């Protein structure tokens, strides 16, 4: 491309000047109107491939010279005319940060579809409790209104808001630490069977602990959360991401320890991937998480008892021994299985005992997800 010219019209005028031709002469040669040639020379009409090819035959200038100049000129004009589109930028941020399609599907946002941006905008404002979408705290510039720990993803934050909204509409007694400790004691006998789990929500509610189950959003990897609506209103949210008896009791007791120690009052930390190293008590974990994990593991199977069982039976664990050990503890074999898998690092051991529990607890709990939507005031 000839870089001495900014537009194809300038190049055409140069070629006409070299030939000593007027625009009228070129019009005659091309067999087109003089007005058309004038518009080409003044860049008021685009140079098409056909016109560029005809000019190549007449002047010997490669057609790409005209077409490349036209492309560059079009880009320059577009940039000059462009105006910032804040709505487009806002939509980009919202749709990149939040799983809006899933939130509509789950009934969290009252909008016809993702194309209904007015509905999406109004729904998001209602969902996050703001007057305008610019204030939604998933956006980088929004003022933080929830004390959430650093590293919480936007999907996790949306899940947290859903838990908070449902919990805030529950009417239960005020919480006291004495009631919380009593609730933990009342939960101990329920470890023996899947059917007994249905009593969990009632026991927690009597102690003043709001208990909500909200299905996790895709890829959020949420297990649970503890936070407080006020000084005497703790909330436990669980996702049942793993529908297993061992995981249910571990996550629940983990969150209960947060409640008993009044964690989550100043900074909310959503518990994600409570398994493997994250279920341990290593130094790489925060102190709050270590103590909660320790309490959860001991609730499933007291550590001293588990140590003794492993010392006696390792490395040949049998189903009969496991069931017998669980019976002496008064717990479901799945709780022993979960601890044994973790301690031995063998996650295929006795998987038949890791039974599902969601269908048992759902009838007695507030459950949002898996096709069910909790009705809340907007």
Image (cartoon, rainbow, N blue to C red):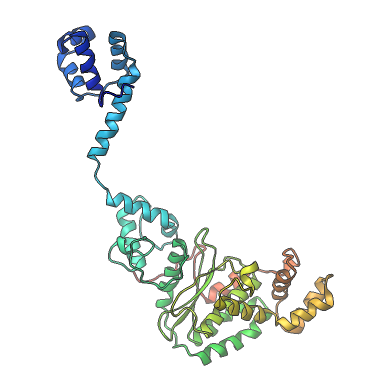
Viewer-proximal residue among 268 and 3: 3
The answer to whether 164 appears left or right of 62 in the picture is: right
Q: Residue furthest front?
A: 4
Question: Is residue 51 in view?
Answer: yes
Taking the image as shown, residue 2 lies to the left or right of residue 268, namely: left
The structure residue drawn at horizontal position 47% and vertical position 65%, both measured from the top left corner, is 152
Residue 133: percent from the left, percent from the top? 31, 61
Q: Nearer the viewer, residue 62 or 109?
A: 62
User: Which residue: 55% across, 72% down?
Assistant: 362
- The residue drawn where x is 65% and y is 81% is 299
x, y percent for residue 168: 40, 77
- Image vertical order of residue 128 relative to residue 304, above or below: above
Examine the image and state in which quarter residue 184 appears.
Answer: bottom right
Quarter containing the N terminus: top left
Image location of residue 238, percent across then percent down: 53, 72
Q: Position of residue 262 (x, y in %)?
A: 49, 84
Q: Residue furthest bottom?
A: 178
């Amino acid at each position: 491309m000839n870089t001495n010219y900014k537009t194809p019209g300038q190049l055409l005028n140069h070629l006409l000047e070299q030939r000593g031709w007027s625009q009228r002469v070129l019009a005659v040669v091309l067999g087109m109107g003089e007005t058309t040639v004038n518009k080409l020379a003044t860049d008021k009409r685009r140079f098409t491939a056909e016109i560029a090819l005809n000019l190549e035959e007449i002047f010997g200038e490669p057609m790409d010279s005209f077409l490349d100049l036209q492309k560059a000129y079009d880009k320059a004009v577009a940039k000059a005319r462009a105006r910032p589109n804040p709505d487009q930028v806002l939509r980009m941020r919202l749709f990149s940060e939040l799983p809006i399609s899933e939130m509509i599907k789950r009934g969290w946002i009252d909008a016809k579809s993702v194309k209904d941006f007015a509905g999406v905008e109004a729904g998001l404002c209602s969902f996050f409790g703001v007057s305008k979408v610019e204030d939604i705290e998933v956006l980088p510039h929004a003022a933080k209104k929830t004390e959430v720990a650093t590293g919480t993803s936007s999907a996790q934050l949306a899940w947290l808001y859903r838990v908070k909204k449902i919990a805030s509409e529950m009417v239960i007694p005020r919480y006291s630490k004495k009631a919380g400790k009593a609730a933990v004691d009342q939960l101990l006998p329920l470890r023996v069977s899947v059917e007994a789990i249905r009593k969990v929500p009632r026991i927690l509610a009597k102690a003043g602990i709001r208990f909500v189950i909200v299905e996790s959003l895709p890829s959020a990897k949420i297990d649970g959360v503890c936070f407080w609506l006020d000084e005497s209103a703790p909330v436990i949210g669980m996702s049942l991401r793993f529908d297993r008896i061992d995981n249910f009791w571990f996550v629940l007791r983990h969150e209960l320890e947060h409640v008993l120690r009044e964690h989550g009052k100043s900074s909310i930390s959503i518990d994600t991937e409570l398994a493997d190293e994250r279920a341990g008590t290593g130094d790489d974990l925060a102190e709050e998480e270590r103590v909660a994990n320790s309490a959860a593991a001991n609730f499933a199977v007291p550590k001293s008892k588990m140590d003794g069982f492993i010392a006696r039976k390792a490395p040949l664990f049998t189903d009969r021994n496991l069931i017998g050990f669980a019976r002496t503890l008064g717990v479901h074999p799945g709780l022993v299985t979960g601890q044994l898998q973790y301690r031995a690092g063998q996650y295929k051991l006795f998987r038949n005992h890791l039974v599902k529990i969601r269908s048992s607890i759902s009838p007695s709990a507030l459950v949002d997800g898996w096709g069910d939507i909790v009705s809340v005031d907007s």
